Image (spheres, rainbow, N blue to C red):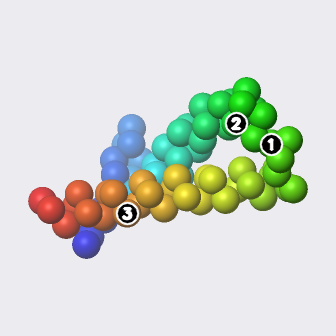
Amino acid sequence: MSFTEVNLFGVYVAPISLMIVAAWLLLLPLRWAAVRVGIFRHVWHPALFEFAIYMIVLSAIVLSATRWNAGN
């Protein structure tokens, strides 16, 4: 597994930084859906719950990128 830097408009950034942004963008509709359904009413600490969901999404992105990179 080797992640190389990504050239983003002339600036080299680490791939994890792009994955962090992608996870945050995926979290936005998930958070909106959770509010609409009313899941946050049943959660003891909404901020910790949201952070846990964010970490799950980020971990899934990193694992899928690792498997995709290993396959090529």
The numbered mark at residue 40 is: 1
Residue at point 32% right, 57% down? 65
Q: Nearer the viewer, residue 10 or 26?
A: 26
In which quarter of the view is residue 29 placed? top right
Residue drawn at x 12%, y 59% is 72
Picture disc at residue 14: none
> What residue is disc 3 on?
63
Of the image marks 1 and 2, the number of the one nearer the N terminus: 2
Element type at mark 2: helix
Which circle's residue, 1 or 3, is located before the other in the chain? 1
Q: Image point 34% across, 52% down: which residue?
A: 6
Does the image show residue 43? Answer: yes
Classify residue 3 by image quadrant: bottom left
Q: State the separation of the CA atoms marked 1 and 3.
A: 27 Å
Residues at badges 2 and 3 in contact (C-beta under 8 Å)? no
> Dividing the image into 4 quarters, which one contains the N terminus?
bottom left
Q: Amino acid at mark 3?
A: Leu
